[in-house]
Image: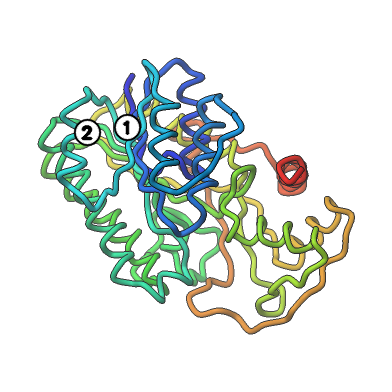
Amino acid sequence: MIYLVTGGSGFIGSHLIERLLRNGHSVINIDNFDDFYSYQIKIKNTLESIGKISDFEFTNKEDDIQHLISLSHSDNYTIYYQDIRDKKGLENIFKSHSIDMVIHLAALAGVRPSIERPLEYEEVNVRGSMNLWELCKDFNINKFICASSSSVYGNNEKIPFAETDNVDNPISPYAATKKSGEILGHVYHTLYNIDMIQLRFFTVYGPRQRPDLAIHKFTKLISEGLEIPFYGDGNTARDYTYIDDIIDGIVKSIIYLENNSDVYEIINLGENQVVTLTEMVAIIEEALQMTAVRKNLPMQPGDVTKTNADITKAKDLIGYKPDTDFQNGIKKFVEWFLRKRH
């Protein structure tokens, strides 16, 4: 099978590509190496995902990305330096390959930055997704997996969150763009018979996690003896999902989509284990064998108080079975972090 993966040099995307290549498939990776966080991290992700870890000598962004493209090209892997907002550029890629399925992970991520840059989030997450659906329509590609987010639930009072819950009350532009993607995806499914699964990811963590996200940021700051920003009273809670379990859920979604027709499904991918901020910090402290220095701060606008995934549908429909509890996941992450640092 030939899979087009958008955002394939990011955290989740690079792990997915690694799995797909290992399973004998061909992959086309589209990534724009956005400056949301260091492009150098994305280059390292890419090299790891294709098994070409090398002493990459960084010079400047444009030259480095071109070097990566030439270094990584093979019979079953192609990478494009491409923004999904550029429909013409995307069209040239679709013309050059026979694509069996699109797995759309590219997005501007993050609740807090979306409050500062709402129009840009709309451009990337809504218009960019529509560009892909338009091209799937034009090139008769009728299998599509899209990354949504647990943020669409907002401050849902019903726990755990189920796919049938009302999600009409997002509390950040990021969440609103993800909800928009689900709605527009249904339009393209209905009008153009594009079989589609929208995956609501619940706070993914693990090796290669973005450095701006809490677990990575806290691990780095604690290991350096620096203050961690501690928002609220510590009772905010998340359903943290280990990267291997997320990849397993995506792969099982791919298999389900390939074996079924007339599909439009929204599926939660979580761990179904809720961890408070206080508990999270304590588990990182234990793994590092260090004590955090907390800087107490008020709750941030747009942050939800709790997430918790009902994964009954994922288990029943695609055979999803997460098996990494939070303590073991943090242990694995800290081992990777310390190894990478040295």
Quick check: marks 2 and 1 in contact, CB under 8 Å?
Answer: yes
Q: Where 273 sits versus 218, above or below?
A: above
- On the image, the x and y values in percent for residue 121 come to 33, 64
Q: Where 291 sits versus 338, above or below?
A: below
- On the image, the x and y values in percent for residue 250 come to 45, 35
In the image, farthest residue toward the front: 59
Could you classify mark 2 by the number of other residues whose Cα lies within 10 Å: few (under 14), some (14-19), or many (20 or more)? some
Residue at numbered disc 2: 93
The answer to whether residue 31 is left or right of residue 318 is left
Could you classify mark 1 by the number of other residues whose Cα lies within 10 Å: few (under 14), some (14-19), or many (20 or more)? many
Q: Where 182 sits versus 100, above or below?
A: below
Residue at numbered disc 1: 4
Identity, as a three-letter code, of the amino acid under mark 1: Leu
Q: Where 197 sits versus 318, above or below?
A: below
Tell which of 79 and 116 is nearer to you. Answer: 79
Give how far apart the Cα atoms at labels 2 and 1 are.
10 Å
Tell which of 56 and 84 is nearer to you. Answer: 56
- The quadrant holding residue 27 is top left
